[in-house]
Image (cartoon, rainbow, N blue to C red):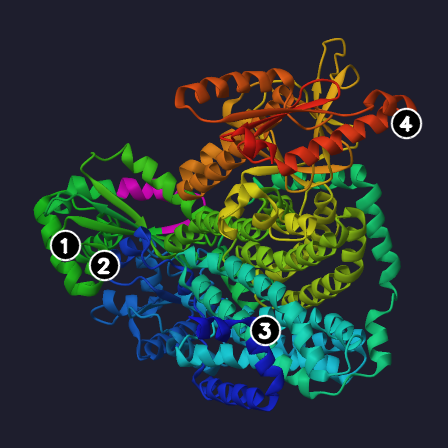
C-alpha cells in the first residue's frame, strides 16, 4: 500500500517527469504515433437519420410500418417546361424515367409516361387523348402534374436503405446530361441528408485550420514569441491526433456533431495552456533551475486544472443521458479529448519546460506587467468592493429577464431550416410545393384489427372521408390512398368513362377491382397502401412541412379527430420519418433538463467536498448558471429554436465556465488563508487570476466564433450562442463570484482551525481528542463559526442554552453575577471565576441539558468561536454513530474534569485557612474529635502539639499586616512540607498552629 501511495503521489511522479524529460517525451511520441496510425480509418457519415432516437417508441412504430407497407423513402425529380404534354418534352421525360428506373437502389419509378404506358395497353393513345383521359383523375394533380401543366414530378421509390448516395449521384449525372428543354432538380429527405453530409465535410476541412490560424495569431499577440505559440498549438495538435485516432480505431464516423470536437479542443486546450505561463514565469523569479521551475509550476497548476477538467467532463458527460446517439458520440470524444489534453499538460509540458531554457526577461515582463488590462482590473475590483448594491441588482434583473425568455423557447428540429436560404437544397424544397405537393411525407395507418375489413365498400368510403379531412389540414398538399388507386382501376376497367371514376358500391366489385389493381399496378403498389389481409390501410400525406413542431401539431390534430370518429378498438398510427425526427427533437428538452440537473448537482458536490461548505457550493453554481440563463433567455426572446446543435450549449458552457470559477476559488482560498482579509484576498486574486480568465474566455469565444461561418445553420447558431455564453460567463466569474464571496467564508473550517491553532484541531481542542481527521470533519460540518468583539457577551447567567463553544482565537472571561441590580449582568456586583483561551470549551452543560447558563461569559479580546448545537450532534449520532460516541466520551471527560476542579475549589473554600493554606479551626476540631474516638476504640497513640508565633503582634505593628500575613503563609507552608500525609495541621488561633500526629506515641512525637 505504501508503494502504491508513493506511485500515485503527485509530487513523486511530477518529480520523475522533470528529472527524466527525454524519456517521457519519447514515450508520448510513440503513443501519438500509435493514435496517428488509426487516423486513415476515419470516414465521414452525416445523415439526417443520426437525429433519430433508435429505441424511441415512434422509431419502432415507423420501423413496423415499413415492414407492413414497405419504405416510403422517395426522391422527387422535378421537371419544368412550357407544356409537359408537348411531344418532345413528354418524350424527354419518358427517357429520363427509363434511365432513373435502371439505377441500383431504385425500386420503382412513377411518372406520367409510365402511367400512360400502363393505362394505354394498345399504345394507340395520342398525348391529347391521354391528357383528356386523366382530367377526372384526382390522383394526378399536384402529385404527377401541376394544374398549369408546366411542371411534373418523376418519383423514385427507393429500396429500404440509409445509403442513398449512389442513387443521388446517379440521378444527378442523368440530370446533368439533360442539356435542353427541361429545367430539372431533385429533392426529398435523402437529398436533405446528403446536403447535410456535404456541408459538414466542407466545414470540417475548412473551419479547424482557420481556427488554428486565428488562435495562433491571438497567442502571438499575447506572448510575441515562438514558444508562446508552439507549446499551446503543439499540445492541442497532439490531443487532436489522439482523439481522431480513437475515432478511427472505433470506426466512429465524422458526423454533424463530432465535427465540433476539433473546434472545441482547439479553443479549450489553448485556454488551459493560458494558465500555465503566468505561473511558470512567477516560478522562474524564485529559482534558477529549469527543472525546479517546471516542477513548482505544474505542482501548483495541476490541481485546479485537473478539477477543471473533471467539471468540464461532468458537463459533457451529462450529455450521455441523451438518447440521440450523435450527441452521445460528441460527449464521449470531447471528454476523451480534454482528458488527453490534461495528460499532455501534466506529463508532456512539464518535460518540455524542464528541457527548454528560460525565456528572456522581456517576454516574462510582457506577460506580468500591468499593461492595458490593469485599469480594467482595478475597475472590476472597485465594482466588487464598493458597488455591489448597483451591480448585483442589475445582474439579477438580467437573470429575471432571461428566465422569462427561457419559457418562450421553442424546441425545434427543422432539417430544411438547417440550411441557409441561399442554398440549393432550401430553394428546391420551397420551390416544389408552389406547383406540386411537398416532398416530406407523413403516413396514416388505419387498423381495423379485423380481417377483410376493407373489402366492404362502406368501409372503403371511410378512407375517402378521412382523406377529405386530411386535405383541409395546413401544410398538407396532397393525400394518396388505396382508394385513389382503386378509383383509377375502376375508371380503367370501364373504358375510362368519367362516371366510373368512383369507389365500387358492391363487395363483388371490390374483389374484382382488387385483382385488377394487382395486375395493372403491381403487387408492390397494392402492398404499399393495403395490408394483405385487408385489415389495415395506409394513407400517404405529401406535405411541405419540415418543422418538428408542425409535424407534431398535425399528428395531434389527426389523432384527436380519429379518436372521435372510429370505435375504441380501431387502431391508427400517424408515422413517418418526419414524425420520428420531431419526437426525437422533443426528447431534447427532457434530456437537456436531465443533463443540466446532473451537471449542477455534481459540480455542487465537488465544490462542497472540497470547501466543506454548502454556501460555497451554491455560490460556485450561481455564476455558472448566469451564462446559461442568458443563453437560453436570449434564445427565447430572439426566437432561436432549441435544436440538436444548440442543445449542446448549456452542458459545454457550464463545463467551461466552471473552469474559471475553480481557478478563481482555488486562488482566492490560497490568498484568504494568508491573513483572513477578504478585501485583500479579492484584490490579489483578481489581479492574478482575472488576466488569464479574460484571455481564456477571449480565446474560447474566438474559437467558437469561427463556427459562425459554417454552412450548417445550427452549427453557426451554436457558435454564436457559445460566444454570447462565454462573454456572460466572464461577467459571472469576475463580477458575480467575487461579490458573493465577500459574504461567505471560503476557507474551510479545517484550514481555519489549523491556521488559528497552529496545529491540527484534534491536537488543540480537547473535545476532538482521539478523533481522526475525517471524524473531526464530520463534527465541524455540524458547527458554525461566530465572531465576538471585545466586551461582547457570549451568554449571560440564567439565560436558556442549547449550544456549546470551542475557542478558535481570543480569550473569554467567566464571571458570576452576585446580584440582580444589573439587567445586563456584567456591570453590577460580580465575581471573577476564570479565563478561557484557545482550545478551551465553554457551555457544554448547556448543550447537553438545555439548562440555564450558570455564569456570564464575556469576550476580553476579538474572539472566534466554533458553535456546536445539540440538534446537530444528534444528527451526527444518526449519521455517524462511532464519531458521535467518541465525541460524547470526550465531552463527558471534560465535564468530569470540570466537576473535579469545582469540587476541589469548593473544598478549599470550606476547609482551608486563606492566610496559611492550613485547615481552619472548625474543620480541624471536627477531624480531631473523630480521631480521638478512633484512638480510644482501637487503642492507638494520638499526639497533639500547639505552636505559638512569638511577638507576632509586634511584627504586624512594626512591619505591617502584609508582612505578617506573608510570615503566616510561609510558616503554614513549612508545616505542610514537614508533616506526614496522615497528619492534620490547622491555624488554631491568630498566631497559633495546631498539629495532630496520628499513630505517634508521645516520645516519638517529641522527637
Check residue 959 in the rendering and tell me which mark sits there, or answer none.
Answer: 4
Residue in front for this viewpoint, 969 or 585? 969
Q: Nearer the viewer, mark 3 or mark 4?
A: 4
In this rendering, is residue 49 above or below 570?
below
Q: CA distance from mark 1 to mark 3?
A: 87 Å
Asked whether residue 480 appears in the rendered view, the answer is no
Range shown magenta? 464-478
* SS state under label 1: helix
364 with respect to 914 (left or right): right
Q: Quadrant of the C terminus?
A: top right
Mark 4 or mark 2, which has the lower sequence index? 2
Mark 2 or mark 3, which has the lower sequence index? 3
Q: Nearer the viewer, mark 2 or mark 1?
A: 2
Mark 3 or mark 4, which has the lower sequence index? 3
* SS state under label 3: helix
Check residue 11 in the rendering and tell me which mark sits there, or answer none.
Answer: 3
Residue under the point 47% across and 81% down: 245
Amino acid at each position: 500500500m505504501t508503494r502504491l501511495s508513493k506511485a500515485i503521489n503527485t509530487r513523486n511522479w511530477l518529480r520523475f517527469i522533470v528529472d527524466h524529460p527525454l524519456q517521457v517525451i519519447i514515450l508520448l511520441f510513440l503513443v501519438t504515433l500509435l493514435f496517428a496510425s488509426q487516423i486513415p480509418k476515419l470516414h465521414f457519415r452525416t445523415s439526417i437519420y443520426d437525429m433519430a432516437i433508435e429505441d424511441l417508441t415512434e422509431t419502432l412504430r415507423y420501423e413496423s410500418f415499413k415492414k407492413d407497407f414497405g419504405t416510403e423513402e422517395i426522391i422527387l425529380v422535378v421537371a419544368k417546361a412550357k407544356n409537359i404534354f408537348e411531344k418532345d418534352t413528354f418524350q424527354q421525360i419518358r427517357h429520363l424515367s427509363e434511365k432513373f428506373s435502371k439505377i441500383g437502389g431504385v425500386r420503382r419509378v412513377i411518372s406520367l409516361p409510365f402511367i400512360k404506358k400502363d393505362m394505354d395497353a394498345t399504345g394507340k393513345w395520342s398525348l391529347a387523348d391521354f391528357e383528356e383521359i386523366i382530367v377526372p383523375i384526382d390522383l394526378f394533380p399536384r402529385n404527377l402534374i401541376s394544374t398549369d401543366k408546366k411542371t411534373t414530378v418523376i418519383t423514385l421509390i427507393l429500396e429500404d436503405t440509409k445509403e442513398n448516395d449512389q442513387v443521388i449521384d446517379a440521378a444527378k449525372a442523368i440530370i446533368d446530361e439533360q442539356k435542353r428543354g427541361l429545367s430539372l432538380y431533385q429533392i426529398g429527405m435523402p437529398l436533405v441528408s446528403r446536403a447535410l453530409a456535404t456541408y459538414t465535410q466542407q466545414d470540417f476541412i475548412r473551419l479547424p485550420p482557420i481556427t488554428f490560424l486565428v488562435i495562433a495569431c491571438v497567442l502571438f499577440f499575447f506572448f510575441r514569441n515562438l514558444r508562446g505559440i508552439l507549446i499551446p498549438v503543439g499540445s492541442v495538435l497532439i490531443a487532436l491526433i489522439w482523439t481522431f485516432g480513437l475515432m478511427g480505431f472505433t470506426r466512429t464516423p465524422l458526423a454533424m456533431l463530432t465535427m465540433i470536437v476539433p473546434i472545441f479542443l482547439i479553443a479549450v486546450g489553448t485556454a488551459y495552456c493560458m494558465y500555465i505561463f503566468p505561473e511558470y514565469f512567477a516560478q522562474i523569479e524564485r529559482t534558477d533551475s529549469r527543472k525546479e521551475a517546471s516542477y513548482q509550476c505544474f505542482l501548483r497548476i495541476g490541481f485546479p486544472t485537473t478539477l477543471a477538467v473533471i467539471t468540464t467532463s461532468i458537463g459533457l458527460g451529462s450529455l450521455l443521458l441523451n438518447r440521440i446517439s450523435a450527441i452521445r458520440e460528441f460527449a464521449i470524444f470531447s471528454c476523451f479529448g480534454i482528458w488527453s489534453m490534461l495528460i499532455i499538460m501534466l506529463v508532456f509540458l512539464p518535460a518540455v519546460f524542464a528541457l527548454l531554457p528560460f525565456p528572456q526577461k522581456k517576454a516574462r515582463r510582457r506577460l506580468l506587467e500591468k499593461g492595458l488590462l490593469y485599469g480594467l482590473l482595478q475597475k472590476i475590483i472597485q465594482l466588487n468592493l464598493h458597488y455591489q448594491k448597483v451591480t448585483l441588482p442589475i445582474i439579477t434583473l438580467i437573470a429575471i429577464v432571461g428566465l422569462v425568455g427561457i419559457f418562450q423557447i421553442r424546441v425545434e428540429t427543422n432539417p430544411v431550416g438547417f440550411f441557409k436560404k441561399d442554398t440549393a437544397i432550401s430553394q428546391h424544397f420551397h420551390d416544389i410545393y408552389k406547383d406540386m405537393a411537398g416532398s416530406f411525407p407523413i403516413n396514416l395507418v388505419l387498423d381495423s384489427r379485423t380481417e377483410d375489413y376493407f373489402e366492404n365498400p362502406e368501409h372503403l368510403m371511410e378512407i375517402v372521408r378521412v382523406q377529405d379531412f386530411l386535405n383541409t389540414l395546413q401544410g398538407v398538399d396532397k393525400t394518396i390512398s388505396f382508394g385513389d388507386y382503386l378509383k383509377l382501376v375502376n375508371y380503367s376497367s370501364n373504358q375510362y368513362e368519367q362516371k366510373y371514376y368512383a369507389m365500387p358500391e358492391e363487395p363483388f366489385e371490390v374483389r374484382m377491382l382488387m385483382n385488377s389493381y394487382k395486375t395493372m399496378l403491381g403487387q408492390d403498389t397494392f402492398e404499399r397502401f393495403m395490408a394483405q389481409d385487408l385489415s389495415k390501410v395506409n394513407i400517404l400525406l405529401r406535405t411541405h412541412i419540415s418543422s418538428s413542431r408542425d409535424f407534431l401539431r398535425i399528428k395531434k390534430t389527426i389523432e384527436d379527430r380519429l379518436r372521435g370518429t372510429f370505435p375504441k378498438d380501431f387502431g391508427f398510427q400517424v408515422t413517418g420519418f418526419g414524425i420520428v425526427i420531431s419526437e426525437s427533437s422533443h426528447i431534447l428538452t427532457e434530456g437537456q433538463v436531465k443533463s443540466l440537473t446532473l451537471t449542477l448537482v455534481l459540480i455542487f458536490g465537488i465544490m462542497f467536498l472540497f470547501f466543506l461548505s454548502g454556501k460555497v457550493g451554491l455560490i460556485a453554481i450561481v455564476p455558472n448558471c448566469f451564462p446559461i440563463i442568458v443563453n437560453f433567455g436570449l434564445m427565447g426572446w430572439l426566437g432561436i429554436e432549441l435544436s440538436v446543435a444548440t442543445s449542446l450549449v448549456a452542458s459545454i458552457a457550464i463545463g467551461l465556465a466552471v473552469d474559471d470559477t475553480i481557478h478563481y476559488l482555488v486562488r482566492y482560498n490560497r490568498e484568504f488563508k494568508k491573513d483572513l482579509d477578504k478585501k485583500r484576498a479579492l484584490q490579489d486574486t483578481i489581479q492574478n487570476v482575472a488576466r488569464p480568465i479574460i484571455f481564456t474566455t477571449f480565446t474560447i469565444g474566438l474559437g467558437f466564433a469561427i463556427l459562425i461561418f459554417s454552412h450548417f445553420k445550427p452549427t453557426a447558431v451554436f457558435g454564436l450562442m457559445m460566444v454570447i455564453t462565454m462573454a456572460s460567463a466572464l461577467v459571472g466569474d469576475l463580477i458575480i463570484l467575487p461579490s458573493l464571496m465577500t459574504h461567505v467564508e471560503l476557507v474551510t473550517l479545517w484550514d481555519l482551525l489549523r491556521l488559528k491553532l497552529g496545529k491540527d484541531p484534534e491536537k488543540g481542542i480537547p473535545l476532538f481528542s482521539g478523533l481522526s481527521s475525517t471524524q473531526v470533519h464530520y463534527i465541524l460540518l455540524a458547527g458554525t463559526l461566530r465572531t465576538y468583539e471585545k466586551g461582547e457577551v457570549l451568554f449571560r447567567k440564567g439565560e436558556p442554552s442549547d449550544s456549546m463553544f470551542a475557542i478558535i482565537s481570543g480569550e473569554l472571561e467567566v464571571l458570576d453575577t452576585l446580584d440582580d441590580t444589573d439587567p445586563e449582568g456584567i456591570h453590577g456586583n460580580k465575581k471573577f471565576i476564570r479565563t478561557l483561551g484557545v482550545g478551551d470549551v465553554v457551555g457544554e452543560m448547556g448543550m447537553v441539558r438545555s439548562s440555564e447558563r450558570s455564569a456570564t461569559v464575556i469576550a476580553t479580546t476579538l474572539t472566534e468561536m466554533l458553535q456546536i448545537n445539540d440538534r446537530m450532534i444528534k444528527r451526527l449520532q444518526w449519521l455517524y454513530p462511532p464519531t458521535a460516541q467518541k465525541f460524547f466520551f470526550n465531552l463527558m471527560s471534560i465535564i468530569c474534569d470540570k466537576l473535579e476542579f469545582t469540587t476541589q475549589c469548593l473544598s478549599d473554600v470550606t476547609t482551608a485557612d486563606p492566610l496559611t493554606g492550613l485547615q481552619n479551626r472548625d474543620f480541624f476540631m471536627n477531624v480531631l474529635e473523630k480521631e480521638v474516638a478512633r484512638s480510644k476504640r482501637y487503642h492507638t497513640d494520638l499526639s497533639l502539639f500547639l505552636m505559638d508565633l512569638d511577638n507576632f503582634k509586634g511584627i504586624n505593628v512594626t512591619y505591617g499586616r502584609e508582612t505578617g500575613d506573608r510570615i503566616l503563609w510561609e510558616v503554614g507552608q513549612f508545616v505542610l512540607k514537614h508533616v506526614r500525609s496522615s497528619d492534620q495541621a490547622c491555624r488554631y488561633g491568630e498566631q497559633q498552629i495546631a498539629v495532630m500526629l496520628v499513630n505517634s506515641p508521645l516520645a516519638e512525637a517529641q522527637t
